Image: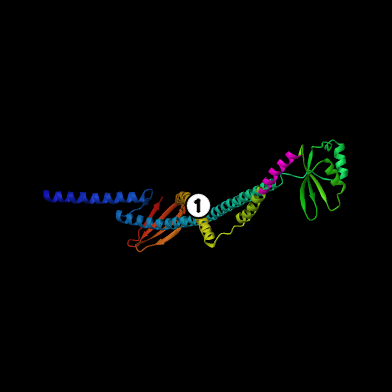
Amino acid sequence: MIKDKSGSILFYSLSLLFILSLLSLASLKLYQVNITNMRTVAEGYLAHSLAEIAYQHEYLKIEDQVESEIEAKYEDRLAQEEKRIEKAIQDKEEEAQEKKREEQEARLKDDKEKQNQDQDVYEPIASLNKEYLAAIIDQGKLDISDPDQVYLIQVNTDLDSEEVLVNGPGLEEMLENEDEETEILLVNVYPNYDQAQEDLSVRRAEEEVNKEQAALDEEDLPEEKDKELSPEEEKAQEEAKKKRMVEAKEKELRQVKAKLKDQQDKEISQQIKDQRANLKLNKRFYFNLGQVEYYTQNDQQHCRVIIYASDNVYDLSY
């Protein structure tokens, strides 16, 4: 008898432990759900399981929809960002090339101006005739009475141009005999003949050097300006340019992708959280073991489950 009683107590204890386990499992699963008019623990757990499956099925559909919509939105944003990055890099590359061209043109212009300045160091003072000579003598701008004073004159004709040194009387004679086809320019005035010769020798040596340098520069400038690259050089430059642009794009795109992915994940998480908090179902679900109907009443979510095996109806409230 004692043995039988001990066995009964053990069986009762195990049964109670099993029931408590089911209740514990059910409470963990149901969290804020209350089941009314529950017949048995097993059937109550089945009712809750069917309700949970139906709810999760609908919730996962909403979750998938939220993820799809937000992912599509961020894919569009990423495509727009990619286009923006490409345009910004292209504009930057074109700006750099334009700046390089402008610097080259400015350098060529400076070189050309320097050549012109070197060539035009000695500008003829004025075109002379006897009336103009008399006028500047009267104005005190020129004095030809000094017998030692020498004048550097440039005589231009249609066929030739030459420079000559003359004294005061020689200058007056040249102006007297000037014809319409001849132009006389006063280039410089020297206190004596020796200084004039010395200056002319230096000038002509400099002019010769300048002419030679100008000729060399004239040959180099078009070559520098209009230099044509070989097909291999053009291809190498184009490949280097494409590589720079691709690397710049990939670098910036990685940063943009990381930023957008972080924003996307946060938005998905928040929207799913909001959807779940505000989810109100009005729908019927059919399973092999029973039927689940979700409905709202007074803005509260309710659920009714019918178990086919017993025809028992369970009401679940949230």
Q: Main secondary structure of the magenta part?
A: helix
Kindly identify the residue that appears in the image at 17 percent across and 51 percent down: 8
| Residue 309 sits inside the magenta stretch | no
Badge 1 density bin: few <14, some 14–19, many ≥20, Cα 10 Å:
some
Q: Is residue 150 left or right of residue 219?
A: right
Residue 11, given in percent of the width and then of the height, sits at 19, 51
Name the element at disc 1: helix
Q: Which residues are magenta?
A: 193-208
Q: Position of residue 285 (x, y in %)?
A: 41, 61
Looking at the rendered structure, the number of numbered marks drawn on it comes to: 1
Please indicate whether residue 243 sits to the left or right of residue 212 in the image.
left
Closer to the camera, 160 or 274?
160
| Res 291 → quadrant | bottom left
Which residue is at a point 30% across and 55% down the rendered structure image? Answer: 42
- The reply to whether residue 220 is visible in this rendering is yes
Depicted 248 relative to depicted 137: above or below: below
Direction from residue 126 to residue 18 in the image, left or right: left
Q: Nearer the viewer, residue 96 or 198?
A: 198
Q: How is the image coloured?
A: rainbow
Tell me which residue sits at (61%, 56%) in the image: 223
Front-lying residue, 155 or 114: 155
- Which residue bears the numbered disc 1? 248
Asked whether residue 271 is in view, the answer is no
Residue 283 in the image: x percent, y percent?
45, 59
Tell me if residue 200 is in the magenta stretch: yes
Which amino acid type corresponds to the residue marked 1 in the rendered image? Ala
Q: Nearer the viewer, residue 274 or 297?
A: 274
Q: Residue furthest bottom?
A: 288
Rendering coords of residue 90 (x, y %): 56, 54
